[in-house]
Image (cartoon, rainbow, N blue to C red):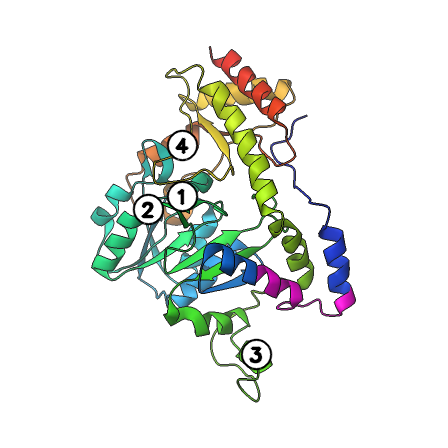
Amino acid sequence: MINFNEPYCTGNEPKYIQDAINRGKLSGNGYYTKKCQHFLEEKLGVKKCLLTTSCTDALEMCAILLDIQPGDEVIMPSYTFVSTANAFVLRGAKIVFCDSRPDHPGMDESLIEGLLTEKTKAIVPVHYAGVACDMDKIMSIAKQHDLFVVEDAAQAIDSHYKGKPLGSIGHLAAFSFHETKNISSGEGGALIINDDRFLERSEIIWEKGTNRSAFWRGEVDKYGWVDIGSSFLPSEITAAFLWAQLESLEKIQEQRKSIWNAYNAVFLKIKNDLLQLPAIPEYAENNGHMYYIVLQNNDRRSELISYLKKKEIHTVFHYQSLHRSPVIAERSFDCSLADYYTNCLLRLPLYADMNVKKAKQIAELVLEHNN
């Protein structure tokens, strides 16, 4: 069986975990947490990075930092993971769903202005498959209407928009280090702060609503409860595992991109209307996170999944359109393209240890079934 995903290990994970144990501090914000945060701040060129236990937690911190209140409206794509919406719904926000692009599952930036109301507070672009949204357009709209932008960069580590690292453009951003992502710590995430207004408070929210970080730096003589917050810090064990991955980022990315390119080279040989291939806009970059194809309809996708399963190849579809969810079923949104991707998009196996030969074999089988 060729699995859809297999977590990648560099070999240094056990060594760094043992070192974390030997250092005698296993709770968060220790040696390895700081190493990871500093690496990401330097790599992304951002003001501040805080490791979190998940991307979901990072997004929840964003909602708190933006002071989302009941009735505030937040614009985001319908075709995304539920955490993108949940983080803001938990603070009382009303989600306004934007449809996907015809050429890509990401949000259609041309529709955003038509969704704005006097209650709109934030826009949350999701860089689907690590491919950038048009951030110039989004940031221009946000500036014009005094809105915040939160980049959901869960899939977008080491990907860029016009040369700028994704996660470094919006006021805030969130990354995922789930086992299905390019860089993994099993579970894990990071909050990125690009706006000075959120620097001090982000650390307080991160530390359960206390000013403990300031205390450890000697800036206050004692720490206490000064704001709302929660336990968003990962342990040093998680951070040690993550460090082994981050220091091998270049190697991991090279391997993943070679597999993505192998898929694409085969599919581009036969251009027809039966398959829609991934589109990378001129302003965006491919980080090798995911190779997907879009079939003509749900039946053809189901047939292909079954066919590949018989060949011992595990493929999976992806998100269910959030605008169809029972949670918000009483509201009406025109997101027909999100429904299209829900019904027709199929993700093919892609992981760092998967070789180019396997990718070519899978692509050839897909074409054989669809021709």
**Residue 322 bears which disc, if any?**
1
Q: Is residue 29 left or right of residue 369?
A: right
Q: x, y percentage for residue 256?
A: 56, 36
Q: Nearer the viewer, residue 164 or 270?
A: 164
Position of 254 relative to 49 (above/below): above
Q: CA distance from mark 2 to mark 4?
A: 15 Å
Q: CA distance from mark 4 to mark 3?
A: 45 Å
Which of marks 2 and 1 precedes in the sequence? 2
Report the span colored magenta: 22-37
Position of 232 relative to 309 (above/below): below
Which of marks 4 and 1 precedes in the sequence? 1
Position of 134 relative to 300 (above/below): below
Q: Quick one: label 3, few (<14), some, or many (20+) residues within 10 Å?
A: many
| Residue on which the image places disc 3 | 212
**Residue 97 bears which disc, if any?**
2
Q: CA distance from mark 1 to mark 2?
A: 8 Å
Which of marks 3 and 1 precedes in the sequence? 3
Q: CA distance from mark 3 to mark 2?
A: 38 Å
Q: Quadrant of the N terminus?
A: top right
* SS at mark 3 in the image: helix
Q: Nearer the viewer, mark 4 or mark 3?
A: 3
Residue under the point 37% across and 30% down: 340
| Residue on which the image places disc 4 | 341
The amino acid on which the numbered mark 1 sits, given as a three-letter code, is Leu
